[in-house]
Image (spheres, rainbow, N blue to C red):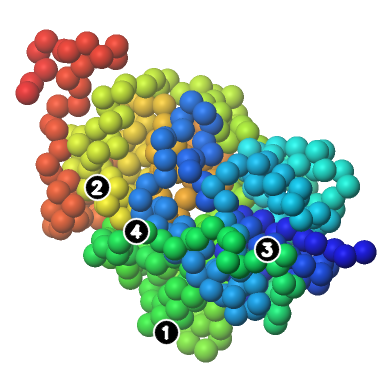
């Protein structure tokens, strides 16, 4: 029987260390490579922004363009669709008599439900999810998903010495597609290059960045510099490519181990692995808690004493609050699609504590803006900062003045991003949007 496969590229936009692509290439005679371009976010409906930011869409398009070029070198090409998973799959299944469907391990409850619906709707088709975007496979973990430790520290102690499986080899050739290359939808980017662009999407750019990072010896000082706010050298900057799957965590770890053997192994190089473990923890966290990762009361049923003030939310998004360090971080985000880890903690703390806002709106805005948006890490970290997640110490509140003195003592970051041009008055309207009579103007 002629086997025709459909491979859904879903946050695994690469050829190297792609176990899903490798398996599909070995099991079918013909293969359709599909990518879906989201027109909006996948946050719960109430919190959906209208569309993805320009930086995020640009990075995504660049990643798909590069993936298509790399597939071309193996005799394949990428088919893209802006329709839903259900509509895209049903059309291709009807037209091409699909026998197998492949995708990398899904980490979101929304996408999992869609996948399960497809399985129910097409019982005659073989559906396969392949472990592909994590350091460890589930069989390696010393606990079941439901028994995930309730803190990162406990998780780290149980897994950090597990031997990571080697990266999968790249396929040397792929089965041909039944779809003519000339009939596919173009994925050429229509976005102009900007001097604000910090990153270029795609596996090729990811590999070059990883090579440059380790060749420059930056890994040896990572722990000391990782809390910087601006520039490209203070942290690894692997996250945009990891989030889109242009780069796998195993590829990063392979290069890290090579650096430790050939150059230096110290606390900073360990800390890069430590951060990869944080990423792994939130993947497992999302597996365990499913849709509860979006819940206002979080995983512990603790409802925060916050509300929603439209004007405050708008000022936070625009970087127009009374807090210069927060303003600078938000303007940096809106311009580049990126913000440092330290900045993300500060703006989230301000959102929850100074502005008393419902944390879910902040998490959703980050989903819209960040080029390195990762569902599990984003929503898990926001729960953490809001006091409804995995932090055993409860609420994390940062003293913004103190943090400014530590991380921007000369005010250079604030000056560059015009953080000092915020509105000194937080509220000019009350919670029901009536003007406040004595508000300063």
Q: CA distance from mark 4 to mark 3?
A: 27 Å
- Expressed as whole percent of the image width and height from the top left, the position of residue 232 reads 32, 68
- Which residue position holds label 4? 191
The quadrant of the rendering that contains the N terminus is: bottom right
For marks 2 and 4 on the same chain, the one whose residue lies earlier in the sequence? 4
User: What number is the disc on residue 179?
Assistant: 3
Q: Residue at x 30, y 61 (%)?
A: 192
Of marks 3 and 1, the one in the foreground: 3
Of marks 2 and 3, the one in the foreground: 3
Q: Residue at x 56, y 28 (%)?
A: 295
Mark 2 and mark 4 residues within 8 Å of each other at the beta carbon: no
Q: Secondary structure at mark 2?
A: helix
- Expressed as whole percent of the image width and height from the top left, the position of residue 275 reads 51, 60
Whether residue 156 is situated above or below residue 199 in the rendered picture: above
The quadrant of the rendering that contains the C terminus is: top left
Q: Residue at x 75, y 37 (%)?
A: 117
Q: CA distance from mark 4 to mark 1?
A: 31 Å
Q: Residue at x 65, y 42 (%)?
A: 87
Of marks 1 and 2, the one in the foreground: 2
For marks 2 and 3 on the same chain, the one whose residue lies earlier in the sequence? 3
Q: Secondary structure at mark 3?
A: loop
- Which residue position holds label 2? 331
- Of residues 333 and 195, which is closer to you in this image? 195
Say few, some or many: other residues with alpha carbon within 10 Å of mark 4 (under 14 / 14 to 19 / 20 or more): few
- Of residues 45 and 398, which is closer to you in this image? 45
For marks 3 and 1 on the same chain, the one whose residue lies earlier in the sequence? 3
For marks 1 and 2 on the same chain, the one whose residue lies earlier in the sequence? 1
Classify residue 90 as left or right of residue 412. Answer: right
- Which residue position holds label 1? 215
Classify residue 261 as left or right of residue 131. Answer: left
Q: CA distance from mark 2 to mark 3?
A: 43 Å
Within the image, what quadrant is residue 439 found in?
A: top left
């Amino acid at each position: 029987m002629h086997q025709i496969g459909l491979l859904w590229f879903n946050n695994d936009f690469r050829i190297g260390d792609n176990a899903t692509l490798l398996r599909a290439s070995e099991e079918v005679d013909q293969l359709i490579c599909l990518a879906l371009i989201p027109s909006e976010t996948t946050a719960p409906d109430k919190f959906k922004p209208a569309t993805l930011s320009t930086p995020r869409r640009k990075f995504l398009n660049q990643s798909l363009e590069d993936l298509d070029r790399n597939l071309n070198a193996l005799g394949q090409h990428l088919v893209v669709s802006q329709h839903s998973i259900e509509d895209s799959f049903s059309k291709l299944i009807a037209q091409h008599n699909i026998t197998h469907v492949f995708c990398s391990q899904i980490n979101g409850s929304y996408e999992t439900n869609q996948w399960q619906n497809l399985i129910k709707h097409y019982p005659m088709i073989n559906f396969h999810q392949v472990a592909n975007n994590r350091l460890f496979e589930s069989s390696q973990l010393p606990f079941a998903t439901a028994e995930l430790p309730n803190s990162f520290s406990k998780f780290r102690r149980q897994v950090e010495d597990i031997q990571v499986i080697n990266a999968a080899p790249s396929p040397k050739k792929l089965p041909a597609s039944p779809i003519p290359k000339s009939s596919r939808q173009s994925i050429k980017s229509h976005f102009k290059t900007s001097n604000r662009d910090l990153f270029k999407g795609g596996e090729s750019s990811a590999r070059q960045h990883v090579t440059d990072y380790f060749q420059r010896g930056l890994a040896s000082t990572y722990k000391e510099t990782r809390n910087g706010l601006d520039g490209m050298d203070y942290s690894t900057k692997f996250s945009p490519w990891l989030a889109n799957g242009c780069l796998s965590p195993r590829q990063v770890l392979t290069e890290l181990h090579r650096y430790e053997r050939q150059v230096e192994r110290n606390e900073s190089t360990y800390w890069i692995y430590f951060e990869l473990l944080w990423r792994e923890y939130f993947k497992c966290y999302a597996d365990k808690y499913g849709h509860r990762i979006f819940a206002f009361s979080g995983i512990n049923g603790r409802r925060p004493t916050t509300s929603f003030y439209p004007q405050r939310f708008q000022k936070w998004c625009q970087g127009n609050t009374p807090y210069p360090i927060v303003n600078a971080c938000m303007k940096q985000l809106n311009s580049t699609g990126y913000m440092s880890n330290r900045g993300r903690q500060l703006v989230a703390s301000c959102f929850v504590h100074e502005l008393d806002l419902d944390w879910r709106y902040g998490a959703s805005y980050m989903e819209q803006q960040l080029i390195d948006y990762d569902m599990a890490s984003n929503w898990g970290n926001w729960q953490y900062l809001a006091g409804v997640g995995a932090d055993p110490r409860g609420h994390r509140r940062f003293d913004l003045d103190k943090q400014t003195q530590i991380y921007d003592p000369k005010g250079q970051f604030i000056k560059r991003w015009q953080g000092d041009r915020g509105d000194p008055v937080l509220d000019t309207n009350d919670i029901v949007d009536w003007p406040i009579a004595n508000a300063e103007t």
